[in-house]
Image (cartoon, rainbow, N blue to C red):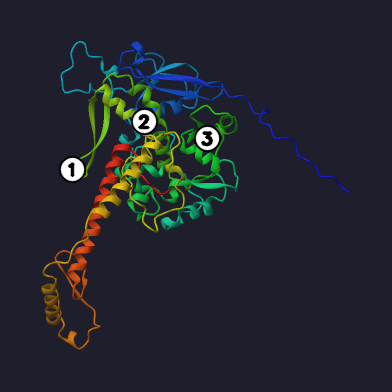
Amino acid sequence: MSLIALRPLITLDVLPKTHVSVISFHHPGYPSEDLDDVLLKLKGFDVPGGLHHRTAWLACAIVAGNAWHGYLTESRQSSPRLTVTMDGVLTGTDYWFHVPNQPFPTTEAPSSLSPPPSLAPYPVVPSFQDWRFPHGNLPSGWVHRVPKEPNVPQAPSNFTATVKSRDQYCRITQCRDCTDAAHVCPKSEHVWFNNNKMRLYNTNQRLNDTVVTNDECNAFLLRRDLHADFDSGKFVIIPKGEEGDWVVHLMEVTYELGKLYHNVPTHDISSVAVEFLLARFAWAIFPWLRVFLTTGKKRWLICCRVDDDAQVKWVTEHVSGDDCRRYAERQGGSRSRSQSPKKRVREGDFDGDFRDEDDTRYSADVSDAFLATTDEHIRKRARHELSTTPPTPPSPDSDAEYAEDVTLLQEILPTIATDPSKEVTYSTDRHWQNITIYPGWRRVERLKERLLEEQRRAAAETMVVEVGCGREVGKEV
């Protein structure tokens, strides 16, 4: 008789140690006193304890408004430039990002006290929602790959099934169990997605605006735990090396993720649009800008504005310290699930996966207890109004209306007298659709309008609470 053979205990002690460094990237256009010039503080996990040069350069260039002509130096002066190759590793603790030929961002003539052009305070994009996607002008190293099989447009209701059928297994671990279709550009950013015309890179051009991110070009398969980490901004997928291989890049210190996956190539993701991968990198970078926005000092910012004609434009503004803090609150510790009021997803648009709307790096602006209290208040008020509002009494002219209805029916369809079961429709100036005419129909229509008005009032009060609290009340998940 053979005995059961037990396998060895799983241990992670054999994994290599992670070398972590913290590197500050400075803005040369602001004074260095009290570290007011710190633009970003990023963590480096690349051997031998530093940060990939191209990745650091890209992060700075994105927050500087896609300044691909910018460069890094080891001092506040604009020269000399770094001699480290773009695929080399930055091992220092402080670097400055310069944007050459940057005009002084003011309508006033520069004075003798103005900084030289190379040190002018170039404007900075304060949040992902204000970032403008660089259509047709991608940074170096971000190139398109021809997919092994072309994507075929699918219905949004088949989104998850389509991605699972295409990828088969997690694109990082090759695991087949417990996998999710992970959005690359987050689903919660559909407003930014539409403002920046990102549907240009979708396979399915007919998706509704609220589910426009549910395209197979904007997703790949991830193991469920990695999906949660991906949506919390712990890692991104970026190109590294001479061949531009897509690899996992850690953004935060973790217990095992860095040891297991940092700089590990992904399995084939050529079916994912490179534009969405760049958008995800930018989305993960902007929360690290809080150090720059929360000093209380004025900053030159590039802000996105939507005018009364729904036209999107980007403007440069000199923003007060308080307003800079408000921009910082849109991300990092207090950013809500979505940057716009949500509507219920229409039937047929649901993809069966709301996971990455739940950005775990963002917390609600108010406590759950307050939301529960507010929600209950709305329900009580609605019940009170419905119970205390008397029903609409019959019109004093109901008998006259009834007689008019009979006369109207006889005029429209003389045969009504001989065929009472005949359904007659009539187009009114209050309704865009035809309604069925019958004796007493006007009183019934008045009752229907009262009910609709009650529903509109309740919905309006709920929206006021949503705007004040920064999250939806009573949303079904």
- The residue drawn where x is 30% and y is 51% is 383
Secondary structure at numbered mark 2:
helix
Mark found first going from the N terminus, 3 or 1: 3
- To which quarter of the image does residue 106 belong? top left
Q: Residues within 10 Å of mark 1 (few under 14, many from 20)?
A: few
Under mark 2, the amino acid is Ile
Q: Nearer the viewer, residue 132 or 213?
A: 213
Secondary structure at numbered mark 3:
strand
Above or below: residue 314 compared with residue 446: above
Dot 2 and dot 1 residues touching (CB under 8 Å): no
Report whether residue 319 is seen: yes
The residue where tag 1 is placed is 308
The residue where tag 2 is placed is 62
**C-alpha span from label 3 to label 1:** 42 Å
Residue 370 x, y percent position in the rendering: 36, 37
Residue 181 x, y percent position in the rendering: 49, 48
Under mark 3, the amino acid is Val
Mark found first going from the N terminus, 2 or 1: 2
Report whether residue 184 is seen: no
Above or below: residue 132 compared with residue 53: below
Residue 75 x, y percent position in the rendering: 39, 13
Task: Answer left or right for 368 relative to 430.
Answer: right
Residue 386 x, y percent position in the rendering: 27, 54
- To which quarter of the image does residue 107 belong? top left
**C-alpha span from label 2 to label 1:** 28 Å
The residue where tag 3 is placed is 248
Dot 3 and dot 1 residues touching (CB under 8 Å): no
Secondary structure at numbered mark 1:
loop
Mark found first going from the N terminus, 3 or 2: 2
Q: How crowded is mark 3: few (under 14 residues within 10 Å), some or many (20 or more)?
A: many
Task: Answer left or right for 163 relative to 189.
Answer: right
